[in-house]
Image (cartoon, grey):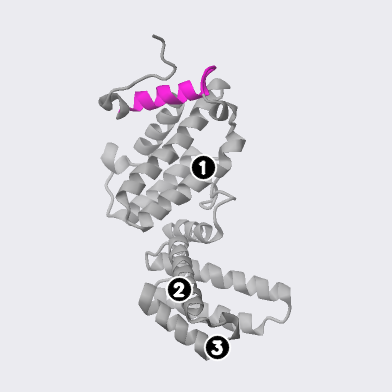
């Protein structure tokens, strides 16, 4: 009897080759109508979404979810690779060959016996070697994705600049710079000046986070989640008491906010 869907053993389900075969089947003539019509362009939003779901699982320290979300992210990579192979753009083997070659080249302290003093040396060497691979991009800041979230982009630029010694000596020096930028924002007269100075404040904050080994995007997402939990707790409390939230004084709102902080963190 010819079955439309192949059956795999538990061992086979844990193998990369099985994953590859399933993707090929989904994109094949008798495969899935949705999967088969996808393009690099149409998959872009799903790739972004899966990246954020991986980040959420990491931030919540949910290892079962992380295992699942990494698989979903891998699915996006495999679909792009399969689409490229069908169009004769490149093959999955090319993807693997390039990343393996890149990892070996950028880790000479592991594969070639180069001596390094620590993680900072590794980071600096990484950027130096990356520049050698792409001689048309001499800037340390070249290659940062244009669509990268702004805070993450700021930290990436800061890390690269710092690897070349362009950095504040101490975290307190950056905080002093923040105070200076806030004062400039206070003095801003036009909307254009306010936007300019506010952007400078965000850039300095991203560098403060970097200096303290804090991922700014992650910290802001966590702060957003806390705000949502607390605000929704306040709304529920008001509904339970029959109180009109909008009619509360600022002092009343502040009391409810403090109660929410204690109740939901």
Does the magenta-highlighted stretch encompass residue 22? Answer: yes
What is the C-alpha distance between the residues marked 1 and 3? 42 Å
Residue 166 in the image: x percent, y percent? 47, 63
Residue 163 in the image: x percent, y percent? 42, 57
Residue in the foreground of this view, choosing between 226 and 175:
226
Question: Residue at point 43% right, 61% down?
Answer: 218
Q: What residue is shown with label 1?
A: 47
Q: Which quarter of the figure is the C terminus placed in?
A: bottom left
Residue in the foreground of this view, choosing between 198 and 169:
198
Question: Magenta part of the protein: which range?
Answer: 15-31
Q: What residue is shown with label 2?
A: 233
Q: Which mark is residue 250?
A: 3
Question: Residue at point 48% right, 74% down?
Answer: 236
Does the magenta-highlighted stretch encompass residue 50? Answer: no
Q: Which mark is residue 114?
A: none
In the rendered image, the vertical position of residue 235 relative to residue 87, given as above or below: below
Q: Upstream in the sequence, badge 2 or badge 1?
A: 1
Q: Quadrant of residue 97?
A: top left
Q: Are marks 2 and 1 in contact (CB under 8 Å)?
A: no
What is the C-alpha distance between the residues marked 3 and 2? 17 Å
Crowdedness near tag 2: few (<14), some (14–19) or many (≥20) residues, C-alpha within 10 Å:
some
Whether residue 91 is visible here, answered yes or no, is no
Q: Upstream in the sequence, badge 3 or badge 2?
A: 2
């Amino acid at each position: 009897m010819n079955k439309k869907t192949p059956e795999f053993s538990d061992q086979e389900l844990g193998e990369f080759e099985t994953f590859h075969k399933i993707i090929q089947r989904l994109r094949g003539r008798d495969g899935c109508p949705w999967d088969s019509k996808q393009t690099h362009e149409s998959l872009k939003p799903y790739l972004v979404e899966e990246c954020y779901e991986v980040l959420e699982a990491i931030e919540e320290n949910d290892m079962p979810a992380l295992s699942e979300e990494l698989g979903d992210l891998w699915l996006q990579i495999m679909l792009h690779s399969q689409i490229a192979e069908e169009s004769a753009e490149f093959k999955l083997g090319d993807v693997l060959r390039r990343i393996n070659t890149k990892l070996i080249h950028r880790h000479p302290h592991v594969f070639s016996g180069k001596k390094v003093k620590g993680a900072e040396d590794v980071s600096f060497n990484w950027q130096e070697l990356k520049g050698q691979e792409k001689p048309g991009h001499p800037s340390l800041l070249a290659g940062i994705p244009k669509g990268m979230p702004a805070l993450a982009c700021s930290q990436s630029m800061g890390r690269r600049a710092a690897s070349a010694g362009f950095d504040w000596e101490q975290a307190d020096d950056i905080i002093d710079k923040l105070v200076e930028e806030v004062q400039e924002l206070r003095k801003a007269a036009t909307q254009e000046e306010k936007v300019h100075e506010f952007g400078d404040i965000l850039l300095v904050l991203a560098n403060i986070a970097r200096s303290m080994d804090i991922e700014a995007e992650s910290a802001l997402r966590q702060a957003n989640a806390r705000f949502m939990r607390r605000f929704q707790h306040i709304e529920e409390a008001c509904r339970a008491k029959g109180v009109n939230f909008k009619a509360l004084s600022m002092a009343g709102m502040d009391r409810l906010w403090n109660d929410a902080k204690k109740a939901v963190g």
